[in-house]
Amino acid sequence: MALPGPAATSFFVQRLTAHRHFWRSSALGSVLEPVLFLAAMGLTLGTLVDRGPGVPGGVGYLAFLAPGLLVAAAMQTATGESSYPVLGALKWDRLYEAVLATPARPADVLAGHLLYVAFRVTTSAAAFLVVLVLFGAAASPLVVLALPVALLTGLAFAAPVTAMAARLEEDAAFAALQRFLIVPMFLFSGTFFPVAQLPVALEWFAYATPLWHGVALARDLALETAEAGSALLHVGYLLLWTAAGTWLAARALQRRLVR
Amino acid sequence: MGGMVESLVRARGLVKRFGSYTAVDGIDVDIEPGESFGFLGPNGAGKSTTMRMVGAVSPPTAGELRILGMDPAVDGPAIRARLGVVPQTDNLDLELTVEENLLVYGRYFGLPRATVRERTAELLDFVQLTDRAKDRVEPLSGGMKRRVTIARALVNEPDVVLLDEPTTGLDPQARHVLWERLYRLKQRGVTLVLTTHYMDEAEQLCDRLVVMDRGRIAAEGSPAGLIAAWSTREVLELRFPVTEGGPSHAAALAPLAARGAVERVEELPDRLLLYTADGDAALSEVLALGLRPLSSLVRRSSLEDVFLRLTGRTLVD
């Protein structure tokens, strides 16, 4: 399969140019969502949790929750940017068709798309980080390491979701994806409580999800409890999803666009 | 090839299959620099599939294809760098402004930003959309979107512009504006390759064309040459009252054909077409036979008649 070339940057620039037209509303969302979640879950629910046995490790609930929530938000952003927009570019607006009439190839489109998702995930996560600090949810300056973890987690979702979108004819499957995978992952992959709380079968489901690895890694780093071995395992697992997803997406786009 | 100018597009036995369906069934085409070349045919004739192969985005199933002297299987990006493509359905970036659509597109061709800026201004002037430069594309009319697409296709100063059904879906006024702009391009020496199922469009814009039907080329020539070769000078169109179960009017006209006053008679659902050198003389003979058509019209032969002759069907149903 061909490696991406300079046209990938051109596609990235095209998406950025479009983003410039609605960055205000998207930035507002990136700030408002963490404010709502940290206020509702972190402050109010957190007070209740902290009055009881609390979360493991002896940290406050807010400090436990915030890095995980930041990574979970990255999953949502990446999934959102790789579902409807990709199918739309294939089917409705025919954006990819227009790009492929130039020297660009499907590999360039894919690379440019992932670059744009990386940009969206990183900037949203940065906004989240600022809110997190303002909420006093940072237990250590190392919480800033949640950013690269968010980026990696975002890509681990963006790549396979792009592969899925590239095979679809109808958008109904995205609602199912959201309902049966993304929302359950959001709720049960360790963002809000340690997965050890779950029945064993569900606990293993959580370990299989890329989100749990992202959340666990970001939390370990932010609370200064990371160990090299498990950290490498998390990174490796997220990279595996990214690589496999990218390969599948490249193949699907090539088949769909060059025929 | 010792100084010989190679065809811009050269196809031999070009085939495209999708599964068991053969969209293009072994066509030979040569398109020379500076000419306007058309693929005329009804929907489903294989025109768009051919255009996608010529656009180096769809690999042929079989046969030989060279574009600008290159092999699209190997040099796709280099070929596309020198083409301008106007697809059948506009595929502008609806989230961008008119101007941004061109600015962003120019980057794919590796052009310096200043050059793209300069050309964007010129091209928007050329398609008469300078005053809409800063507007979003989405709310523009169909004709305006089409013009933006054409301007975008010219941003790399292509050697060949491929136009797939350039005016389909536009109102008559928008079509004429577009034809006039395309005619100017042609005068500047740009090679135009277009598909159409409108005979008037083919007659207006094409120096040379092929008539396509069911994936094959049925005939090739200039519009006038094709008409001369495949039709008569004039056509007499007759409409008769609907007769149910009675003898057909075509049968009643048989004596005219036998006498040579009419070369050929085509029976369409709503009218009869009498192919003849002299339409008025043929009409007198029809009346002399005692036939009383509801209406009659004498006109010159068109590409529509050529198509009917070649395929037994009309272009636009």
Image (cartoon, rainbow, N blue to C red):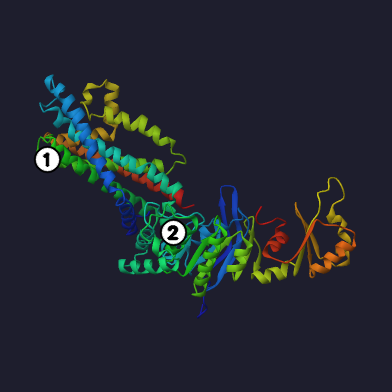
Q: Is residue B226 left or right of residue A14?
A: right
Tell me if residue B316 can be seen: yes
> On the image, numbered disc 2 is attached to which residue?
A101
Please name the residue shown 31% across and 44% down the image: A243
For the residues labelled 1 and 2, the Cα–Cα distance comes to: 46 Å
User: Horizontal and vertical percent for residue A226?
Assistant: 14, 35
Question: Which one is nearer the viewer's eye here, B164 or A146?
Answer: B164
Question: Which one is nearer the viewer's eye here, A20 or A15?
Answer: A20
> On the image, numbered disc 1 is attached to which residue?
A142
Image quarter of residue B99: bottom left
User: Horizontal and vertical percent for residue B160?
Assistant: 48, 68
User: Badge 2: few (under 14), some or many (20 or more) residues near its Cα, within 10 Å?
Assistant: many
Q: Is residue B263 above or below residue A88?
A: below
Q: Subunit of mark 2?
A: A
User: Badge 1: few (under 14), some or many (20 or more) residues near its Cα, within 10 Å?
Assistant: some
Q: Is residue B168 above or below residue B110?
A: above
User: In the rendered structure, which amino acid carries the disc numbered 2?
Assistant: Ala
Q: Subunit of mark 1?
A: A
Q: Is residue B14 left or right of residue B243?
A: left
Tell me if residue A241 can be seen: no
N-terminal-most mark, 1 or 2: 2
User: In the rendered structure, which amino acid carries the disc numbered 1?
Assistant: Leu
Q: Is residue A62 above or below residue B168?
A: above
Image quarter of residue B24: bottom right
Q: At numbered mark 1, what does the secondary structure look like: helix, strand or loop?
A: helix
Please name the residue shown 20% across and 40% down the image: A128
User: Horizontal and vertical percent for residue B34?
Assistant: 52, 74
Image quarter of residue B257: bottom right
